[in-house]
Image (cartoon, rainbow, N blue to C red):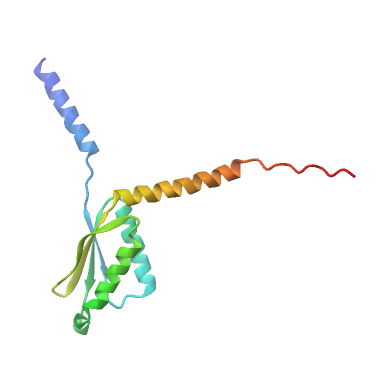
């Protein structure tokens, strides 16, 4: 085997391994203890999108002033976020207080995403099957 062919094969293997690898980055979403319902829903939808793309998401609750004396409010928000995105992600790092911030890390959960996709696929297939099935024509009445 000549050296040129060896180099070419090595380059092809390296290229293939780079193509198969996924680049997971950490996205961050910041919440506040007094967040409104609309803002909460919007941010949580964005977190769900990040998880579906395969990214990890770091959720930060920022406390200011007297809010520091109520870490239970931040914990409630983090629990609500974790509950909303449970179909696509799981908690990798439990909520913990870090100075003025409370932090939790969510990671994509492949099994839960696949289960959700198969359930959605089955519902879609059933709807298509029902739409494609020809309706039985009614027999004409004899008089």
Q: In the figure, residue 75 lies in which quadrant? A: bottom left
Q: Position of residue 102 (x, y in %)?
A: 19, 71
- Pick the quarter of the image with the N terminus: top left
> Left or right: 119 with respect to 134?
left
Q: Position of residue 105 (x, y in %)?
A: 22, 61
Q: How many marks?
A: 0
| x 87%, y 43%: residue | 142
Q: Position of residue 110 (x, y in %)?
A: 30, 48
Q: Is residue 84 above or below residue 9?
A: below
- Pick the quarter of the image with the C terminus: top right
Residue at the outermost left position: 3
Q: Is residue 47 above or below residue 5?
A: below
Q: Position of residue 103 (x, y in %)?
A: 20, 67
Q: Is residue 3 above or below residue 95?
A: above
* Relative depth, front residue between 16 and 121: 121
| x 30%, y 78%: residue | 34
Residue at the outermost top position: 1
Residue at the outermost front position: 142
| x 24%, y 37%: residue | 20
Residue at the outermost bottom position: 66
Q: In the figure, residue 83 lies in which quadrant? A: bottom left
> Left or right: 65 with respect to 49?
left
| x 78%, y 42%: residue | 139
Q: In the figure, residue 33 lies in which quadrant? A: bottom left
* Relative depth, front residue between 3 and 25: 25
Q: Is residue 28 above or below residue 36?
A: above
């Amino acid at each position: 085997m000549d050296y040129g062919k060896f180099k070419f094969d090595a380059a092809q293997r390296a290229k293939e391994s780079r193509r198969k690898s996924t680049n997971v980055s950490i996205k961050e979403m910041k919440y506040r203890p007094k967040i409104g319902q609309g803002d909460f829903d919007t941010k949580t939808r964005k977190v769900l999108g990040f998880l579906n793309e395969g990214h990890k998401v770091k959720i930060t609750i920022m406390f200011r002033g007297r809010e520091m004396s109520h870490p239970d409010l931040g914990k409630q928000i983090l629990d609500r976020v974790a509950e909303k995105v449970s179909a696509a992600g799981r908690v990798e790092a439990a909520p913990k207080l870090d100075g003025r911030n409370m932090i939790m890390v969510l990671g994509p959960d492949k099994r839960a995403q696949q289960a959700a996709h198969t359930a959605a696929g089955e519902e879609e297939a059933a709807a298509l099957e029902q739409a494609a099935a020809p309706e039985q024509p009614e027999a004409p009445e004899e008089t």
